[in-house]
Image (spheres, grey):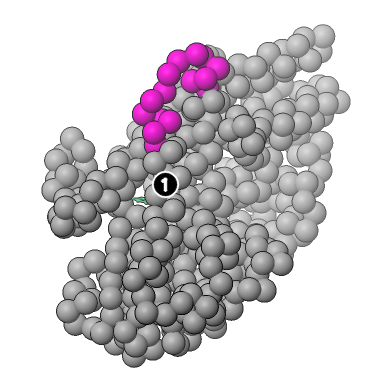
Amino acid sequence: MNKIAIIGTGYVGLVTGVCFAQNEDNHVICVDKDNSKIERLKKGEPTIYENQLKYYLNKAIYSKHIEFTTNLDYAVGESDIIFIAVGTPSKLDGSVDLSYVYSVVDEIIKAQQKYEKELTVVVKSTVPPGTCEKIQDKFNDALSNYYLLTFVVSNPEFLKEGVAIDDFMNPDRIVIGSPKNCGNINTLYCYDVKPDTELLICDNTVTAELIKYASNAMLATRISFMNEIANIANLVGADITKVEKGIGLDKRIGDKFLKPGCGYGGSCFPKDVLGLIDLSKQLELPSYVIQATYESNLLQKRMISKILAKEIEYHTLYPRDMKVAIWGVSFKPNTDDIREAPALSTIDHLLWQYDFKEIAVYDPKAIPNLKKELGEKSNRITYGNNMYDILDGANFLIIHTDWDMFINADLEKVECLMNGGTIIDGRNIFINKQIEKEYNLKYKHI
Ligand code: UGA
């Protein structure tokens, strides 16, 4: 039996724990400081919205392959492999805040001294290259008098929110970095690995850590590049969907992550691009491309506001007589996560710049998080029960998230409710619908 502890029950920790617990050779203990989270998880209630999570969580609880606790000491005592999956947010200056990781390391060391056991410690949190080596030094220093060994292994995750379970079960690759025998953690994955999954073992941790940062920065750069091409296409009158297809058909480029939009968000791309910029600064290396990706995305997140401002300038009504409706707040579909979401930039701008008659918002999952984020400002917004009731009398409909329900919208109903209004489509979901020809609506896209 593999005895595994996972510290941190955020997206990565919870999905990793639940997926490992599907294997009958594994026993998993998930640890979190937040008691309310742990109590909900014990009852089989997922603490995040993630496709299939509830099913697999309850399956694991039923088969007794998973436990939840706030007691890290107990989890270390019961386990041989400890995964660290706590957050590594950006600090205000863009550098990476590793305090949660290091405080977990300190607690593991304390428990290890108490139980006098050897451990494999796997860092799943996204950390700047070089961090695992520092963690290894910390273990070595603290445990040398105890003659105890600890193997620190880097095992970055490549899960996309919304499809994280599927990504875990069917990964493109599993990356493991370790100067030793990779703590044998590859055997944990062996059972579930599909034939086309590549297992990439690196003989140091720094390589695996850099693969993670470079992957996210590369994808963020592709998106930003396409956003800039879309902005050019709009001005020269090119069809961006054909441009996207034409580029993606080149097998060297491929067709994934080429969708232009109102900017990338989430807890990963923005943070990891900043993390790489910070690393380059520390290394005194110029990082023009990565810096440009960062700045380009900041500008793109203001694009919707820019389009709206232009439309307002030529409108016969004043903002105080206008209603703006917003579809989608989460940074992408199938999640309630609004971290760094482009919708937040737009809403901020709308509240600060104008005095609209009404701002109405609908999102199928993310409204509770938006209310929390906006605090008192939330009173200035109305929230719909469904995607259509906020459109009644709206002069503008802004689309920030490509939820399926919006893609499949009944456009005749939209036309009827908005009566000559303008759609500003931040995800280009209606770009092929001939909106202006077939409906009494104006249409702007990225
Ligand atoms: C991202 C990576 O895709 C995962 O591989 C990685 O494991 C994860 O970060 C992480 O580091 O934990 P995630 O943040 O869940 O996953 O979301 P993505 O699906 O990558 O989307 C990020 C943003 O890019 C979204 O705002 C999305 O709307 C935008 N996007 C994506 C585009 O604008 N165009 C595209 O073609 C694709």
Write down the region rendered in magenta: 279-293
Camera-nearest residue between 336 and 231:
231
Q: Kindly report the secondary structure that dominates the magenta region of the rendered protein.
A: helix
Camera-nearest residue between 415 and 279:
415
Query: Can residue 199 be seen in this snapshot?
Result: no
Q: Position of residue 29 (x, y in %)?
A: 70, 45
The quadrant of the picture occupied by the C terminus is: bottom left
Question: Residue 26 is drawn in which quadrant?
Answer: top right
Does the magenta-highlighted stretch encompass residue 281? Answer: yes
Q: Is residue 342 left or right of residue 58?
A: left
Instruction: Classify 10 Å Cα crowding around label 1: few (below 14), some (14-19), many (20 and above).
Output: some
Question: Residue 132 is drawn in which quadrant?
Answer: top right
Query: Can residue 204 be seen in this snapshot?
Result: yes
Residue 92 lies, with reference to residue 288, above or below; the image says: below
Residue 358 lies, with reference to residue 263, above or below; the image says: below
Q: Position of residue 278 (x, y in %)?
A: 54, 25
Helix or strand or loop: what does disc 1 sit on? helix
**Residue position for label 1:** 299
Q: Name the residue at 78% across, 46% down.
A: 33
Residue 320 lies, with reference to residue 131, above or below; the image says: below
Camera-nearest residue between 345 and 257:
345
Q: Position of residue 251 (x, y in %)?
A: 16, 39
Q: Position of residue 126 (x, y in %)?
A: 55, 34
Q: Name the residue at 21% across, 77% down.
A: 436
Does the magenta-highlighted stretch encompass residue 320? Answer: no
Camera-nearest residue between 285 and 247:
285
The quadrant of the picture occupied by the N terminus is: top right
Q: Give the residue type that dot 1 points to.
A: Leu
Q: Name the residue at 47% across, 34% down.
A: 273
Q: Residue furthest right?
A: 114
